[in-house]
Amino acid sequence: MQTTGKNISLAVIKRLPRYYRYLGDILDDGITRISSNEISLRMDITASQIRQDLNNFGCFGQQGYGYNTELLYGEIKKILGLEKQYSMIIIGAGNIGQALANYINFQKRGFNFVALFDANPKLIGLTIRGIEIYDVDKLPEYLAATRVDIAVLTLPKNSATEIARIVIDGGVKGIWNFSNIDIKTPNDVKVENVHLTDSLMTLSYKLNEKEILSRFGASL
């Protein structure tokens, strides 16, 4: 895999997991070779956009042949860093935190939950799928003794900034934040802010798109 040395746009990066997921489905169907046009039909992305996206990372296809499905799947796996195993903790063992801990497909992708933390004494000491819930006051001590790659924040936004500071000070380099507040981090700490309501509001827009565009004098 070779890159051009330029910065890859966020839009391209966000499409890579979709390519990976669809190629996995294609492999499960026993399809060993596929063209960008065939991927386009499955994903509703233009063939030229697919080729442009993939060309950011190297030349994976062959004109007149297309892509070797298994090879392309493996290359995107490398690009996404999925050949590694990631140690993860969840801070906030409420409904969202427990749902994430129970989702076994994370582990299949190499994302392994090793602990949960919460301030609720009724939850401390319980286990979710064999993963213990610890007192959040023990978080600095835990981070000092255990390597953690990613911290998942599923706690109220008024606590998120302080907890983020603790996990950063504890050496965590990745934060997956569900706390409904955008967290700022140092350059060497990467954060993905997830706003569930944003996704729902986007769906609301799509449901009302014709009416909205008509109201503002635009067209589809």
Image (cartoon, helix red, strand yellow):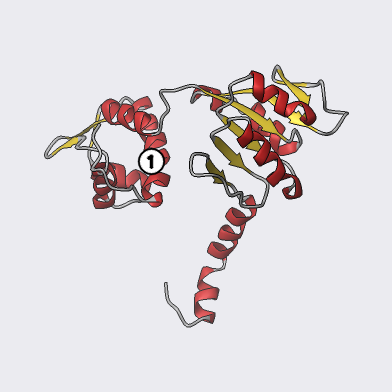
The image position of residue 159, as x and y in percent, is 75, 45
* Above-or-below relation of 161 to 208: above
The image position of residue 95, as x and y in percent, is 74, 37
Considering depth in this image, is 104 or 171 the residue closer to the camera?
171
The quadrant of the image that shows the C terminus is bottom left
* Element under disc 1: helix
Considering depth in this image, is 45 or 152 the residue closer to the camera?
152
Report crowding for label 1: few under 14, some 14 to 19, many 20 or more residues within 10 A (C-alpha): some
Residue in view at x 76 percent, y 24 percent: 133
> On the rendered structure, is 184 left or right of 37?
right
> On the rendered structure, is 20 left or right of 174?
left
* Above-or-below relation of 191 to 129: below
The image position of residue 144, as x and y in percent, is 65, 23
Residue in view at x 83 percent, y 28 percent: 123
Considering depth in this image, is 46 or 191 the residue closer to the camera?
191
> On the rendered structure, is 137 left or right of 38?
right
Residue in view at x 74 percent, y 29 percent: 117
Task: Give the residue pinned by disc 1.
Answer: 16
> On the rendered structure, is 191 left or right of 170?
left
> Which residue ends up furthest to the right in the rendered image?
122
The quadrant of the image that shows the N terminus is top left
Residue 3, picture quadrant: top left
Residue in view at x 80 percent, y 21 percent: 126
The image position of residue 41, as x and y in percent, is 31, 47
